[in-house]
Amino acid sequence: MSIQVFGLPVSRGVAIGRAVLVASSRVDVAHYFVPASQTRREIERLRRARDAVAAELSALQRDLPAEAPSELSALLDVHLMLLHDEVLAEAIMHWIQERHYNAEWALSAQLEVVARQFDEMEDEYLRGRKADMEQVTERMLRALSRDGMVAVSPVAAPARGAEGDAAEDPLVLVANDIAPADMLQFKRSVFTGFVTDVGGKTSHTAIVARSMDIPAVVGAREASRLIRQDDWVVIDGDSGVVIVNPSPIVLEEYRFRQRQSELERARLNRLRHTPALTLDGENVELLANIELPRDAQAAVEAGAVGVGLFRTEFLFMNRGGVLPSEEEQFEAYRSVVQTMAGLPVTVRTVDIGADKPLDRMTLQELRHEHALNPALGLRAIRWSLAEPAMFRQQIRAILRASAYGRIKLLLPMVVHLREIRQTMEIITRARQQLLDAGHPIGEVELGAMIEVPAAVMMLPAFFRYFDFVSIGTNDLIQYTLAIDRADEQVAHLYDPWHPAVLKLIADTIACAQRLGKGVSVCGEMAGDPAFTELLLGMGLRSFSMHPAQVAGIKQRVLRADTRKLQGAIERALQSEDPQTFWSTVGVRADDAAEAVVHH
Amino acid sequence: MSIQVFGLPVSRGVAIGRAVLVASSRVDVAHYFVPASQTRREIERLRRARDAVAAELSALQRDLPAEAPSELSALLDVHLMLLHDEVLAEAIMHWIQERHYNAEWALSAQLEVVARQFDEMEDEYLRGRKADMEQVTERMLRALSRDGMVAVSPVAAPARGAEGDAAEDPLVLVANDIAPADMLQFKRSVFTGFVTDVGGKTSHTAIVARSMDIPAVVGAREASRLIRQDDWVVIDGDSGVVIVNPSPIVLEEYRFRQRQSELERARLNRLRHTPALTLDGENVELLANIELPRDAQAAVEAGAVGVGLFRTEFLFMNRGGVLPSEEEQFEAYRSVVQTMAGLPVTVRTVDIGADKPLDRMTLQELRHEHALNPALGLRAIRWSLAEPAMFRQQIRAILRASAYGRIKLLLPMVVHLREIRQTMEIITRARQQLLDAGHPIGEVELGAMIEVPAAVMMLPAFFRYFDFVSIGTNDLIQYTLAIDRADEQVAHLYDPWHPAVLKLIADTIACAQRLGKGVSVCGEMAGDPAFTELLLGMGLRSFSMHPAQVAGIKQRVLRADTRKLQGAIERALQSEDPQTFWSTVGVRADDAAEAVVHH
């Protein structure tokens, strides 16, 4: 039976595919498909993990401290029963044999099935017993990770031998929520669309999907409960509708729309080598945001004239607690610099910390407790300065890579002058040590992210130290309005068009230009065509965005006349409702609707 | 043996007393002492709760759904064993009989003892089993609350019959952390000092302790583990040292210091009826922040010339989920207005929501899930507008109270113009309905808290709707710098002296004055003598603070000459390090050290 689910359309386009359900888990679980030839090996891993956990629990029971409450041993008995429950074990193996899930995914997929049974129980207390189930599963997941998770090479698509006919079908991902680390994993995978129960227009899933140009609907409430494994799903990223098991007529209609947008995309791609000049001849720098070294190739192919933001935190994620060495980082940075072949590469030092934990086993987790408001906590430059050994290592790696091309060093979340001074001291010392050791070092420009309100007000002082700044609009909006964009309850109040936000952005651009410094925008606004004219009008000439967005923004640039925009900008900044003003007065409405390519 | 523990000195003075340990709990637990005559009744309540929970669990076990995993029944058996554990039951009764704790406190105190045993276990998994213990306890706590917690009248001091000699000793509170709701409870209690393991200079405990003028040391790490029930404790709120079981010599030294500060306080109190005029004759309005109607009396006694901030959220707390009716709220507001006898009373609509939950059983808890960054979530006016029925009720109660005196209505966390328009519509309609129903209504001024950076930038537009604003410096600093002041890891970066913060405050004061509107500061800076001259120099003439701080600030006002301050202010606002500038150039250093009273 065909059903419809409604959510927020956060990334445009149509995706059609079979549903792959991914359960959320408290332990970071890698989700990948194993080759058919390796399923037996996965089942064997699972068995070993179970035996290991059973042995551990028995040992614990034997060695219980004398003063322990007598009920503790009885509890362990129950957990041992769970571990040896044959019905459960069969179900887990099924996921591996039939779906080719890796062992961790199979385990958490089955936990999800059982968890749903618990969730349906009427009594809150019984529902709470799910926790015991989860803890046994977690212990098994840990045993698995000790067992060497990385030994298996993930494959992008499932090779579903038993259901041969389905092997070629495109896949869409359906989940309650997708962790940033998983999203990174899925980027390399074959999913053609995303549906999540939670999240808003500005959640991480939405941002990544949009930047990958993959259709997505989030905030679809019950989607992950209503959609079953292997259901056919149509994701309409324009309207926010998700259609489960569509009728043939509906399906045909969506296939038609899908073909149309592919044609449109091909048309945009022809702009790749066109210089980004406005109608009045202003040269605009369109740069790429990248997350992993391999993304640099996509940046070049998209026609970006450099990397405006290399988010290095992704080098640190999904590594099972092993941090990348200086050497490994150096190779990563050098590879990007070399791929970009003389074009500038802006490397941002890690923006990890309370709000973006690496994974369960890192320094972060060990040393720092959970923060109540991670977005206002120890993150980015604060975290780097609190972990000086790691920070020095990253700085050294970046400086060494500067010998191979043009590197710009970008510091995230700077608020206090003393943070700058401390960082400069680390850089100066690292540079001297490297030179003493005979390493060649190129010229490195130093810049800061402008993403906290205080930073905008400190600009004149900051520019005594910095050559350039890059405006991180997402965080800047978040702090200026005190709205967490990932919080569904207030996401409707997160507003890039808020007069205070526009004023801070305009002030930043104006201050940089007055002082002859570089200024770029690397937040989501840079890749959103709705803001291109506005930012051009404010004087911005450097935009950094996901490679997939470059062509679309270039099209807007080619059609813009900055001379005509300046007057409108001043009035927009005075307006109490800049969005309405801009859409009715500032720019002709048909501009936004059209998609004609000019050469 | 005497030991010393070191923490952060957050509220000045010396406290000496016997330790009362309060354990933290996931369920809101009321902590109070019961009269000796009622301990048998408490034990009886406990028994009834246990029997009720046992009956519930047995019923659940009998009616388990057929598809439930077979291990579930075995788990329930273990929990039933726990419930009937005689050793445990004896220990809980001991707290009631010997300490005169109420049943809930006794239960959570014993849970804490057992929890510590678990925490000391080496294996993480065994430690995790504590959760089962906690869940049984929680279910009993809920059963107790159904049983009518409010029937017992709390007494402020324990009447410890069995240890008669100790009955007169002053008490100090030692806890891992103190919940805001508990802190409210303890305000009415007899504790003469506070020690907590966690928290920073700007945590809730610190702020309340400071405003109550009770010595406190927070962030004392292991204090609640090292200090035992009834230990003698000296809290040095000046240096952050906590001395457990001090030697007679040390004790005598601290008693001497205690007497000295009492003398100092008495001296300040003589300023009560002196008008707050600067040396150059500027009249300064010193107002009180209050949390409960009964605080109004303290405001009058402290010589405050009005209530600058009535934090109404406290009317909503600790009520076991029952929200106050319009009638009840009306009585509360009217009582304050009448106590203030014609002096202005600024009533702030509730600032509850994601960051300040009421308690486990309210609408809040039922409707909204846990926010990842509650400070950036659904709180204050956002919450009120999302709960319009409650909001209308509060507005009606405030409007009705306006017939009995001078009320100013203050809206928290306003950021968007549409929030103002929506609120005004609710007010206009409520006013009309009340008039139609024949209720008298006085003139009510409308104002907004300025506590989000965007609000400062919106001031000219906001003032089309508002008669006055009140600057909430704590939150304003938090959002401007993106620092959670309650997060120990970054608390050192929370800085009221940051140039961006001072600029926003100065801009707000200047804008209000230019437009002839009222402006006040009601955050912590208003009650901190270190900022009095600075704020006076910026043009501020209205300060709102805890009643206990009024005399100290008045002393600063009496010594200030605003004509001399203005020049220094401009230079301070240009300075990159205003704090150093202000302490060396702006104001003579000896001013800050002196405490001479001028009449």
Image: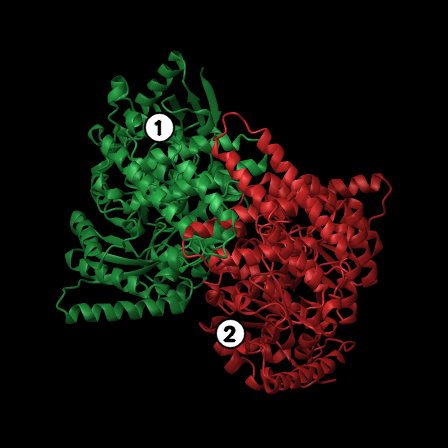
Chain colours: A green, B red
Nearest the camera: B381 or A82? A82
Residue B43 — which label? none
Q: Position of residue A480 (x, y in %)?
A: 49, 53
Q: Is residue B1 above or below residue B423?
A: below
Q: Let me know if residue A176 appears in the view.
A: yes
Can I make out residue A558 in this image? no
Q: Residue furthest top?
A: A249
Residue to which mark 1 is pinned:
A90
Dot 1, how many residues are within 10 Å of its Cα: few (below 14), some (14-19), or many (20+)? few
- As rendered, which of A319 and A56 lies closer to the eye? A56
Q: Give the structural element (helix, strand or loop) at label 1.
A: helix
Quadrant of residue A559 within the rendered picture: top left
Disc 1 residue type (three-letter) = Glu
Q: Position of residue B128 (x, y in %)?
A: 46, 50
The kind of secondary structure element at disc 2 is strand
- Callout 2: few (<14), some (14-19), or many (20+) C-alpha neighbours within 10 Å? some
Left or right, residue B261 beside residue A581 = right
Find residue B388 and report its horizontal and vertical position in percent: 67, 40
The answer to which of B186 and A207 lies nearer the viewer is B186
Q: Quadrant of residue A110?
A: top left
Same subunit, tags 1 and 2: no
Spatial CA distance of label 1 from label 2 is: 55 Å
The chain letter for the residue carrying disc 1 is A
Q: Which mark is residue B6?
A: 2
Q: Classify the position of the N terminus of chain A by image quarter.
A: top left
The quarter of the rendered structure image containing the C terminus of chain A is top left
Between label 1 and label 2, give the one nearer the viewer: 1
Q: Label 2 amino acid?
A: Phe
Q: Name the foreground residue: B100 vs B27.
A: B100
